Image (tube, rainbow, N blue to C red):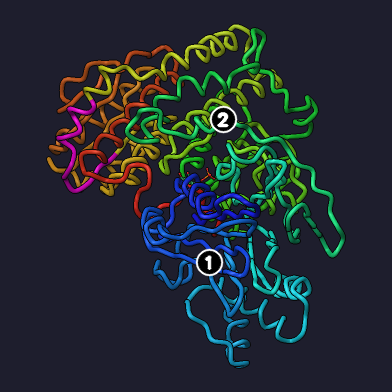
Amino acid sequence: MCGIVGYLGEKEKKEILIEGLGELEYRGYDSAGIAVMAGEELRHFKAVGKLENLKRKAENFESEGYGVAIGHTRWATHGKPTELNAHPHSGAFSYVVHNGIIENYQQIRERLEKEGVNFLSQTDTETIVHLFEYAIKRGMDPHEAFVETIGELEGAFAILLISRAEPEKIFFAKNGSPLLIATDGEDIYFASSDTAVIGRAKEAYYLEDGEYGWAERGRLAIFREKEMVEAHFKNLPSDKAMARKEGYRFFMEKEIYEQSRVIADTMLGRVLDEGIFFEELEESFFDGIENIEICACGTSYHSALAASYLFERVAKIECRVEIASEFRYKEPLLSKRTLFITISQSGETADTLEALKMAKKSGLKTLSICNVDNSSIVRLSDATLLTRAGIEKGVASTKAFATQMMVLWMLVLYLAKRRGAIEACRLEEELEAMRKAPKVLMVAESLHQRIHRLSKRYLHGHGFFYIGRDLFYPLALEGALKLKEISYLHAEGYPAGEMKHGPIALADSELFTIALMPSSVLYEKMRSNVEELSARDATILAISPERFDIADDFIETRYSEHPMLEFFEMMVVTQLLALEISVRLGNDVDMPRNLAKSVTVE
Ligand code: G6P
């Protein structure tokens, strides 16, 4: 999804912008651009496709001395991914970059066109810069013009604007899309995510919805409803190395291998001898809670679905799970006795955020499970459990999913104990299994090699079915999602027991079935379901600790003592399988076509 960076200072502006945009690449984009004002000179460069193209275009450009600069990576929403539609958008003397969607842009555009304003692009964003300049033409000073402009906008936005009318300032505004201001003590940086400024800036202020203002050398003015706001800056981590590939071919591969380590981080200080402890949660937080509703999107939805089995089975608490975009418009019946949980890697997913707002409006207690501290979802929730996965760069989520599952498993045990739903010896067994998870998640070289070899047999066919039962059904959904995201092959996750009610009609030797066959959960049932498919000549790849003769291919797993350990081990297998198939097909594993890492529009 779109990324924003801004810079105000003496350093080489082009480099800072392009470097910052590079750090946001993982979010997905289809064009990019920068605008730089140094002295009287206001220049811009735009290019379709990768940042390399932009770099080439701006190759001979250098700016000296103090100046202001803004940059953007665009993920097309209104208008095709063309150079004309790429940001920054300009008027006669100003440039703007914008994330989000201006919902009333058509009305504004028609009005301005009647006044003789000429539009070049098909974007909603261009209306912003014209509104601003039109206000100046009507005699307003740039500050008034900016306030007037954002006052007219409906929808979600994070905006940076520079103008020859006020050449030493960057104007900014935030409403519904993330934006932060950062500093190294000297210069000022802007970004839609702190990833873009880590390593350069030392501290950041995360703007709240409704905040706007302007920055110039040595001065920052932030307002909310015309009142000046005091910015409380927070320290940023300095560790940029975390965000690099460290010798792996792809970020996704690195992140798969990291899972063992980050899951240990997730557990740190939380898995104690007597049970689970969450520093972030008051004991009383769950008072009066009778059931759970979870909302999420994509991979996070799959972790929610898997957890719902555990909440009901182990913690004996009713749990409903909804895709956030469905929840928003179904006019759901909400009760104050429900704990509303949102799960999100980024903490910025628009549908999940809106679902959270709805729950808050209805007076529900809210808890988020999130990977990004200070993200919109975290800030809005009553309480948060951070997943501690570290920055996840691969668009296809891996370690974020693993850590979400771990936090959810911990939360299940925490609630089970609190509700008296689990016996002491059973809790002990669960904790013992939990402590083994980092080991289970270690990637054995031999396993990766085997999957690499097998992958060559799975590059064609008319489709993949990932099947599983119980907890392993959501894992099948996630396995199929991983494959389709990065291989562009058609894959579906299905509850194994449901195959005979339709999908089995597709079975022939060109239908690839990836069967998740844990020995600790419904093994015999699963076996019969796979036999039914095999009898119809489907090609079967079985993943199981039990040898299974009728499978065409077999990946043997090692840990069978606990469903969650089997879950984690099979999760790694499905991730590696998707990775290796995608590599063989020559795809861009980290930045698959049409996808965005953080989806900040509905
Ligand atoms: C996008 C990403 C997915 C992610 C989903 C939800 O579609 O490509 O990987 O699962 O958004 O994102 P969230 O940040 O809320 O977990």
Q: Which residue, given by chain and number where applicable, does mark 2 sit on?
A: 239
Q: Is mark 1 within 8 Å of ligand 1?
A: no
Whole-percent x, y for residue 329 in the image:
59, 60
* Left or right: 519, with 379 as reference point: left
384 part of magenta stretch? no
For residue 370, which quarter of the picture?
top right
For residue 69, which quarter of the picture?
bottom right
Residue 88 - label? 1
* Left or right: 557, with 94 as reference point: left
Disc 2 marks a residue whose amino acid type is Asp
Bounds of the magenta segment: 451-465
- Kindly identify the residue that appears in the image at 24 percent across and 22 percent down: 555
Judge by depth and name the residue closer to the eye, 170 or 463: 170
Q: Specify whether residue 138 is in view.
A: yes
Q: Specify whether residue 380 is in view.
A: no
Whole-percent x, y for residue 428 in the image:
58, 8
Judge by depth and name the residue closer to the eye, 514 or 196: 196
Between the C-alphas of marks 1 and 2, the distance is 30 Å
Disc 1 marks a residue whose amino acid type is Pro
Label whose residue precedes the other's in the sequence (1 or 2): 1
